Amino acid sequence: MKTALITGANRGIGLEFVRQLKDKGYYIIGCCRNTVKAQELRKLADELIQLDVTNDNDISSLMKTLNSRPIDLLVNNAGISGEQGVTIGNINRDNYSGPHCQDSDPFNLRYNFNSTFFR
């Protein structure tokens, strides 16, 4: 069975990745900042891991939890849409985390996923 790790998996595009990859037979490791609010993800994912991609301690903890288990697919989705309910017309620096997460923090996550994690 192939394994997919999905960041930002608790809602929106991330949750849809979970649904579709689960339907394709993947073992799903779903990651999100707040696991308490991730009720639907909890039902779908094989594993649920708290992960804030802007937090180096969370990334280190994820690496320890995975313990060099092979990952077939990494979906780096965290930080794309900002806060729920924010529309394009009212995005500002306080409610939009997209560029910061998309440009720098996924690099930190990818950096930690060295070749031993990927099949």
Image (cartoon, grey):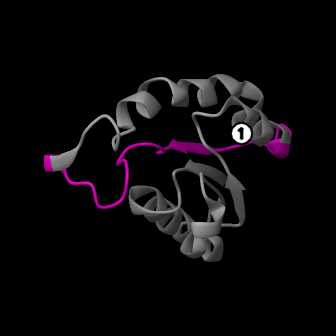
The picture quadrant where one finds residue 68 is top right
- Magenta includes 26? no
Quadrant including the N terminus: bottom right
Give the answer, above or below, for where 73 lies relative to 44. Answer: above
46 relative position to 106: left or right: right
**In the rendered image, which quarter is residue 13 located in?**
bottom left
- The location of residue 3, given as percent across then percent down, is 67, 53
**51 vs 72, nearest the viewer:** 51
User: How many callouts does the rendering have?
Assistant: 1
Left/right placement of residue 106 relative to residue 100 reads right
User: Which corner quadrant holds the C terminus?
Assistant: top right
**Per the image, is 81 magenta?**
yes
Please name the residue that numbered disc 1 is placed on: 58
Does residue 23 show up? yes
Q: Residue 102 in the image: x percent, y percent? A: 42, 32
From the top left corner, tell me how far across and down residue 64 is, in percent. Answer: 84, 38
Q: Residue at x 80, y 44 (%)?
A: 66
Q: Residue at the location (64% across, 72% down)?
A: 42
Whether residue 1 can be seen here: no
Left-right relation of 20 to 29: left
Q: Secondary structure at mark 1?
A: helix
1 shown above or below 58: below
Name the residue: 49% across, 23% down.
104
Per the rendered image, the range of residues in magenta is: 65-89
Residue 61 drawn above or below residue 83: above
Q: Amino acid at mark 1?
A: Asp
Q: Nearer the viewer, residue 10 or 118?
A: 10
| Residue at the spot 55% in from the left edge and 75% down from the top edge | 40
Mark 1 crowd level (few <14, some 14–19, many ≥20, 10 Å Cα): some
